[in-house]
Image (tube, rainbow, N blue to C red):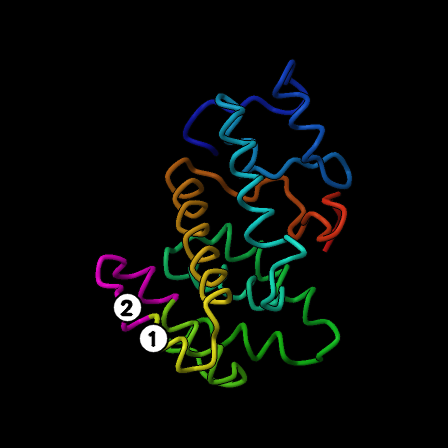
């Protein structure tokens, strides 16, 4: 149960109802992480804009499954079961064409230091993700240089940073306000091209 009042889609009116209409998925579902913003609809709009830009924008260059993997890793480190569960489903969807890879990678995300089948470059990215999540005040230029040395250009580094930072925000929204998966179908996401919502 959420810790604060939530206005459900059935109760919504005005601006909130219009926003809910835009973010409604199949079967009329509005994810609980979105409904938690109902008392301040402008924060829901901001959340959705950031989420779509960071994870689902067609101009992102890193593979979608790996962006989802970063989200799962950050959520696990932050003990946010809600986001870890949702984005594990997203990660699995993007890896359907590679049988076995999801299970192997997902298992590694539970380890102290994820290894294969993540590539050395991906492992370097996950080490940065861990450092930024666990000890953000200690991140410095040497951490970025290690990413470059692993073969990651600055645009990729920005994407890794932004997904990590977004999940720090989302995890704290969820855990700090008591958001859970009650009544939800896991794994809805906006289509990368159209922005419309669909089952993963």
The count of marks equals 2
Q: Residue at x 57, y 57 (%)?
A: 87
| Residue receiving disc 1 | 145
Question: Which residue in the rendered view is the most extreme toward the left?
Answer: 138
- Residue 15 lies in what quarter of the image? top right
Q: Assign a secondary structure to mark 2.
A: helix
Question: Which residue in the rendered view is the most extreme toward the front?
Answer: 154
Q: Position of residue 190 (x, y in %)?
A: 69, 47
Question: Which residue in the rendered view is the most extreme toward the top?
Answer: 14
| Residue 36 to residue 18: above or below | below
Q: Position of residue 108 (x, y in %)?
A: 48, 77
Horizontal relation, residue 64 to residue 127: left or right: right
Q: Residue at x 45, y 45 (%)?
A: 170
- Where are the magenta residues, as a range? 129-143
Q: Assign a secondary structure to mark 1.
A: helix
Mark 2–mark 1 contact, CB under 8 Å? Answer: yes
Q: Position of residue 114 (x, y in %)?
A: 43, 78
Quick check: is 133 in the magenta stretch?
Answer: yes
Q: Position of residue 35 (x, y in %)?
A: 56, 31
| Residue 105 to residue 67: above or below | below
Horizontal relation, residue 78 to residue 200: left or right: left
| Residue receiving disc 2 | 141
| Residue 165 to residue 22: above or below | below
| Residue 4 to residue 62: above or below | above
The label on residue 82 is none
- Residue 144 lies in what quarter of the image? bottom left
**Residue 124 vs residue 177, the one in the foreground:** 124
- Most prominent secondary structure in the magenta stretch? helix
Q: Residue at x 54, y 72 (%)?
A: 106
Q: Quadrant of the C terminus?
A: bottom right
Quick check: is 78 in the magenta stretch?
Answer: no
Q: Residue at x 66, y 21 (%)?
A: 17
């Amino acid at each position: 149960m959420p810790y604060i009042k939530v206005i459900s889609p059935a109760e919504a009116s005005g601006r909130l109802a219009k926003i809910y209409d835009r973010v409604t998925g199949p079967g009329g579902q509005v994810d609980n992480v979105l409904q938690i913003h109902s008392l301040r609809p402008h924060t829901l709009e901001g959340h959705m804009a950031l989420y779509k830009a960071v994870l689902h924008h067609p101009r992102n260059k890193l593979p979608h499954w790996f962006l989802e993997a970063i989200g799962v890793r950050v959520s696990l480190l932050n003990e946010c079961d809600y986001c870890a569960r949702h984005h594990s489903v997203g990660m699995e969807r993007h890896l359907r064409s590679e049988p076995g890879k999801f299970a192997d990678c997902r298992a590694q995300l539970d380890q102290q230091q994820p290894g294969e089948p993540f590539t050395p470059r991906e492992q370097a990215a996950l080490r940065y993700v861990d450092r930024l999540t666990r000890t953000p005040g200690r991140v410095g230029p040497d951490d970025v240089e290690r990413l470059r040395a692993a073969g990651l250009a600055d645009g990729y580094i920005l994407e890794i940073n932004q997904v990590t930072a977004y999940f720090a925000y989302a995890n704290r929204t969820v855990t700090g306000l008591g958001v859970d998966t009650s009544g939800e179908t896991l794994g809805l996401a906006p289509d990368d091209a159209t922005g419309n919502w669909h089952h993963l």
